[in-house]
Amino acid sequence: AQRKRFPHVAHMAEVRLSEMMRHYTRAGDPLRNDEYVWLYGAPSALLHGDPEGMRDLMPVDDDGTQHFALLLEDARLNALMVDSGSNALVFCDAFVSRFHPENAGFHERLSDLARTFKELSLKHSHGRPDEGLMALRNELEEYHKRE
C-alpha cells in the first residue's frame, strides 16, 4: 500500500540511519564518525527500544506478549531516567556543535542542563560507582568555586 501511495520513492535503495548520520555529521570522513551514530543510538535505545531500561519497563511474558510493568524500585527508576536525559543531552550537544556551532545561547543552555543532570546523578545515585560519584562531586565543586 505504501509503495502505491508513494511511487516516486518506492524503488529507492534503502539507506540505513547510520549511513545518513555519517554523511551529515562528518561528510568526507566516513572512518571517524561512529561516535555520532552512537550519540543518536544511545538515547534512542534507552528511551524507546533497548537496552536496559526498556527490558525492565516492558517485560516479555512466556507467551511472547510484551506489556508495561513498573517493577523497579523508585531509586533505580530515578537513576535510569537521569541517565536517559543525560544521554539525550550528549546527542543534543553533538547536534548543536555540528549544525549550530556559533549559537552561544544553545551552548550555554546545554552546559546549564548538563550541570543540572550531573547534580541529579548525585541525587539519584542508585547503582553508580563511588569513583564516578566522587568525580562528579569534584567537578561540581570546581564549577561552584568559579561562579
Image: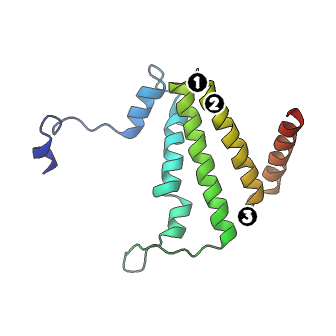
Give the left or right position of residue 112, taking residue 94 as reference: right
Instruction: Relative to 87, say whether 62 is above or below.
Output: below
The mark found on residue 103 in the picture is 1
The mark found on residue 3 in the picture is none
> Quick one: label 3 or label 2, which is nearer the N terminus?
2
Few, some or many residues within 10 Å of mark 3 (<14, 14–19, 20+): some
Closer to us: mark 3 or mark 1? 1
> Quick one: label 3 or label 1, which is nearer the N terminus?
1
Looking at this view, is 32 or 39 the one in front? Answer: 39
Instruction: Relative to 20, say whether 83 is above or below.
Output: below
Mark 1: which secondary structure? loop
Q: Which residue is mark 3?
A: 126
The residue positioned 37% from the left and 75% from the top of the image is 64
Q: Which residue is mark 2?
A: 107
Residue 129 image point, x, y percent = 77, 57
Q: CA distance from mark 3 to mark 1?
A: 35 Å
Q: CA distance from mark 1 to mark 2?
A: 7 Å
Question: Residues at badges 3 and 1 in contact (C-beta under 8 Å)?
Answer: no
The residue positioned 69% from the left and 68% from the top of the image is 75
Q: CA distance from mark 3 to mark 2?
A: 29 Å
- Label 2 sits on what residue type? His
Q: How many marks?
A: 3
Residue 108 image point, x, y percent = 67, 31
Residue 49 appears in the rendering? no
Mark 3: which secondary structure? loop
Question: Residues at badges 1 and 2 in contact (C-beta under 8 Å)?
Answer: yes
